[in-house]
């Protein structure tokens, strides 16, 4: 016990003597929340679009006005040539071209069928998907309007009206959606990067050799090394959670203690990953790259930025074993849905098993004697 | 192993793949001895020392240190030895006081004992003004003397020193050796590797390693007699030449 206390004291002295540490701990969550929660959004507004209206009819003008009247689209230019209009794609002046062919209105009135074409810049595939969605919705809405208004084809087409109601995040506020994810990313970074680098630093400086020749026991060393980052991680989560609640106005429907319970078990998983990385590397540079490799994979596949449900099956299988995805899901459940302990028990069990496996691996890999 | 041997080594070997770093070395060290462990770079000194400290498991052969087996009782060995490596072992971002306190605590000294030791060492090394200074701000000579003092803070039976005086000036080296003598007077066995042949003259007995083997082992004056030369330097050159 004394040995562990002595190591803890030394670690805290070193961590807080490092000038970069305190600003990092305070400002990292602040900036990440501030920037990412406002910048990373699935919603796209102010999409510039071009119109090629060869019909110049009442219908065609009304359709275009439906686009401009929405919050999403801004008219960039109107022309009579698709080729000319496509120039705007190259300069990024427009991302969508609405092409209305000749006889758009006449065809509709005579045969009840007419066509428009959307040309979408699909460099960014997910943005293209969203733009397409908006455009289709606007057009469909207009379609139902003219069908009901014009008695041209009465009751030939029956339409199903869809009413939307967004649960758990009614205003589709992306800050609300992003904050839990960013908090997850934050504690993950502290747990895996900082702990791993800290141990490897002793290797780099050669002080690990001195420790290995003392009677320090393996468990004492590991507890002494990891506990500080467990404490810092949890403290950071509490700090970030408060920022989220009081500055960003994110709701917390569930219990904050449930979040802390989950996080305290989750930290063992990431600390284990950090320790494991430190046992297979010799320099901080190596540790950094390996940690980075795994974190990028885990983060991008963790559902923080893109929904796991939209990944292909094989990726969802991988995501199933991704602790970040699990924690992220559980955080959103508790914060936005107010999930209870019974709802997150499977996640807790998963973390416990994961922590035991990864810690065993790491402890087994860490050797005082070669 | 005889009663009066604190380190006893027989046919100790360490192989890394097909390379034999230490090749069947055999020797004994008596309590209170200053045992010099000499050899050119890459002769296998550090590897041999790491096995004796319990940092590295031998490939074959036998050895006991303070009565403990180097295969099975490495952790018991660690309680009874001090170690100072060529790579500097104090924490640069901790103060003198914090370093003493940390290593004292790691060796299980009580809080009061650590305080006493801190005062004692600061007084002994005459570094009162550096008490609360970070190690990185101290001159190399001070650091090495402090590192040695910390290596024997728990009053071990044996202290292993791996090139402890690398890079320091002759006066500091002399002072360092005074500290080694004081430790030996308190019946601490000193096992030291060095490149400086004048330091070899200070040892009770000296072993010369060449290519992983012990090429010669005796008192410095006996070795000089045996090779018909005047200094340890010449002994070293004669022995090490075939390897070069």
Image (spheres, grey):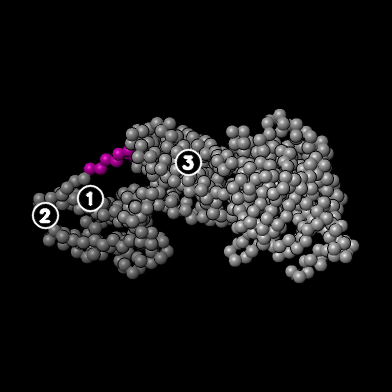
Q: Looking at the figure, which quarter contains the N terminus of chain A?
A: top right
Which secondary structure class fits the magenta region best? Answer: loop
Q: What's the CA distance linking mark 1 and mark 3?
A: 49 Å
> Is residue A5 depicted above or below B226 in this figure?
above
Q: Residue at x 56, y 54 (%)?
A: A281
Residue at 35 percent across and 68 percent down: it is: A84
User: In the picture, residue B115 is in which quadrant?
Assistant: top right
Pointer 1 and pointer 3 on the same chain: yes
Query: Could you give the CA–CA distance between mark 3 and mark 2, rounded to whole angstroms?
Result: 66 Å
Does the magenta portion include A165?
yes
Q: Which residues are magenta?
A: A163-171
Q: Circle 3 sits on which residue?
A: A267
- Which mark is on residue A264? none
The subunit carrying tag 1 is A
| A299 sits left or right of B36 in the view | left
Q: Crowding near pointer 1: few (<14 within 10 Å), some, many (20+)?
A: some
**Is A104 on the left or on the right of B33, as rendered?**
left
Q: Would you say A106 lies left or right of A338 here?
A: left
Question: Mark 3: which secondary structure?
Answer: helix
Q: Is residue A357 visible?
A: yes
* Residue A293 location (% of width, % of height): 48, 55
């Amino acid at each position: 016990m004394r040995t562990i206390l002595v190591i803890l004291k030394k670690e805290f002295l070193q961590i807080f003597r490092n000038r970069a540490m305190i600003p990092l701990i305070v400002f990292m969550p602040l900036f990440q929340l501030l920037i990412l929660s406002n910048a990373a959004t699935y919603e796209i507004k102010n999409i510039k679009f071009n119109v090629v209206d060869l019909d110049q009819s009442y219908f065609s003008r009304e359709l275009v006005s439906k686009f401009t009247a929405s919050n999403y689209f801004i008219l960039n230019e109107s022309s009579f040539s698709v080729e000319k209009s496509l120039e705007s794609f190259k300069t990024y002046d427009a991302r969508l071209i609405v092409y209305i062919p000749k006889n758009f209105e006449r065809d509709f009135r005579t045969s009840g069928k007419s066509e428009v074409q959307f040309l979408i810049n699909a460099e960014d595939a997910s943005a293209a998907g969203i733009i397409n969605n908006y455009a289709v919705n606007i057009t469909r809405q207009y379609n139902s309007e003219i069908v009901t208004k014009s008695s041209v084809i009465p009751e030939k087409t029956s339409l199903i009206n869809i009413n939307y109601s967004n649960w758990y995040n009614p205003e589709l506020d992306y800050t609300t959606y992003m904050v839990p994810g960013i908090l997850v990313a934050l504690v993950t970074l502290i747990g895996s990067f900082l702990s791993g680098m800290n141990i490897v630093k002793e290797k780099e400086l050669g002080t690990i050799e001195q420790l290995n020749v003392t009677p320090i026991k393996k468990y004492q060393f590991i507890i002494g090394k990891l506990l500080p980052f467990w404490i810092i991680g949890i403290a950071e989560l509490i700090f970030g959670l408060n920022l989220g609640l009081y500055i960003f106005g994110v709701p917390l429907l569930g219990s904050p203690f449930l979040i802390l319970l989950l996080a305290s078990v989750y930290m063992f998983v990431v600390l284990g990953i950090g320790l494991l990385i430190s046992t297979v590397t010799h320099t901080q540079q190596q540790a950094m790259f390996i940690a980075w490799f795994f974190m990028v994979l885990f983060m991008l596949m963790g559902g923080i930025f893109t929904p796991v449900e939209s990944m292909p099956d094989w990726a969802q299988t991988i995501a199933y074993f991704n602790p970040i995805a699990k924690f992220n899901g559980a955080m959103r459940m508790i914060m936005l849905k107010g999930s209870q302990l019974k709802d997150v028990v499977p996640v807790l069990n998963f973390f416990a098993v994961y922590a035991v496996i990864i810690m065993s691996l790491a402890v087994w890999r860490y050797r005082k004697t070669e | 192993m005889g009663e009066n041997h604190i380190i006893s080594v027989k046919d100790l070997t360490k192989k890394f793949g097909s390379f034999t770093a230490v090749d069947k070395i055999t020797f004994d060290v008596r309590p209170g001895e200053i045992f010099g462990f000499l050899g050119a770079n890459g002769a296998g000194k550090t590897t041999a020392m790491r096995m004796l400290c319990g940092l590295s498991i031998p490939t074959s052969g036998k050895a006991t240190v303070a009565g403990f087996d180097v295969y099975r009782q490495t952790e018991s060995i660690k309680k009874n030895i001090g170690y100072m490596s060529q790579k500097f072992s104090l924490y640069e971002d901790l103060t003198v006081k914090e370093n003493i306190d940390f290593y004292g605590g790691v060796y299980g000294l009580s809080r009061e004992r650590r305080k006493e030791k801190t005062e004692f060492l600061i007084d002994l090394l005459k570094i009162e003004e550096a008490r609360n200074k970070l190690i990185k701000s101290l001159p190399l000579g001070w650091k090495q003397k402090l590192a040695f003092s910390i290596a024997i803070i728990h009053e071990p039976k044996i202290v292993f020193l791996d090139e402890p005086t690398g890079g320091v000036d002759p006066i500091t080296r002399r002072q360092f050796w005074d500290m080694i003598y004081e430790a030996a007077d308190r019946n601490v066995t000193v096992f030291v590797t060095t490149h400086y042949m004048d330091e070899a003259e200070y040892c009770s007995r000296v072993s010369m390693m060449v290519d992983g083997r012990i090429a010669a082992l005796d008192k410095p004056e006996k070795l000089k007699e045996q090779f018909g030369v005047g200094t340890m330097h010449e002994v070293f050159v004669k022995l090490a030449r075939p390897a070069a």
